[in-house]
Amino acid sequence: MIDALIAGRLYGHAEERSGQAGSAYVTCKVRAATDDGELIFCNVIAFKDDVRAALLALADGDSIALSGALTPKVWTDKQGKVRPALDLIAHAVITAHQATAG
């Protein structure tokens, strides 16, 4: 596990789901730019109530910064090229909505 801080834009909309034991969680994807300008996608899951609420309040393309436990991964695209991906268990979130409301 890597303790990380990522910033980017929400890709699509966050989705609320329920686990087998009935616990609620939210999943979403965040697009983040690398140093060379390429985009990388981060798969996010959140269990904390305040983080879940903040993610559900966002729309596609909204700016976001998240901190949490990061796991790097790779996947293969349709052309057979290996690409990086990230999975993040979000513990805290900052959005533009929060920054202007405070």
Image (cartoon, helix red, strand yellow):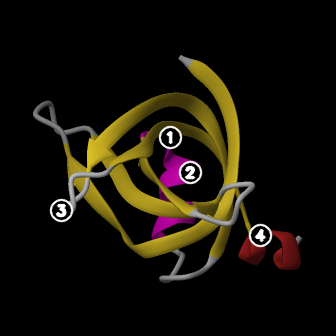
**Distance from label 4 to label 2 (Cα)?**
12 Å
Mark pair 1, 4: CA separation: 17 Å
**Residue under label 4:** 98
Q: Give the mark, 3 or 2, whose residue is nearer the N terminus.
A: 2
Residue type, numbered disc 1: Lys
Q: Which residue is mark 2?
A: 51
> Do the numbered discs 2 and 1 sit on residues whose CB atoms are within 8 Å?
yes
Instruction: Give amino acid for label 2.
Output: Val
| Farthest residue, direction top | 1
Query: Observer-nearest residue: 50 or 72?
Result: 72
Residue 13 rendering spot, x and y as whole percentages: 39, 75
Q: Residue at x 21, y 52 (%)?
A: 80
Asked if residue 10 is positioned above or below residue 93 in the image, the reply reads: below
Q: Which residue is mark 3?
A: 78
Dividing the picture into quadrants, the one containing residue 94 is bottom right
Q: Which of the two discs, 3 and 1, labels the residue nearer the N terminus? A: 1
Instruction: Give x and y (percent) for residue 46.
Output: 45, 44
Mark 4 and mark 2 lie on one chain; the one further toward the N terminus is 2
CA neighbours of label 2 inside 10 A, class few (<14), some (14 to 19), many (20+):
some
With respect to residue 88, does 93 lie above or below?
below
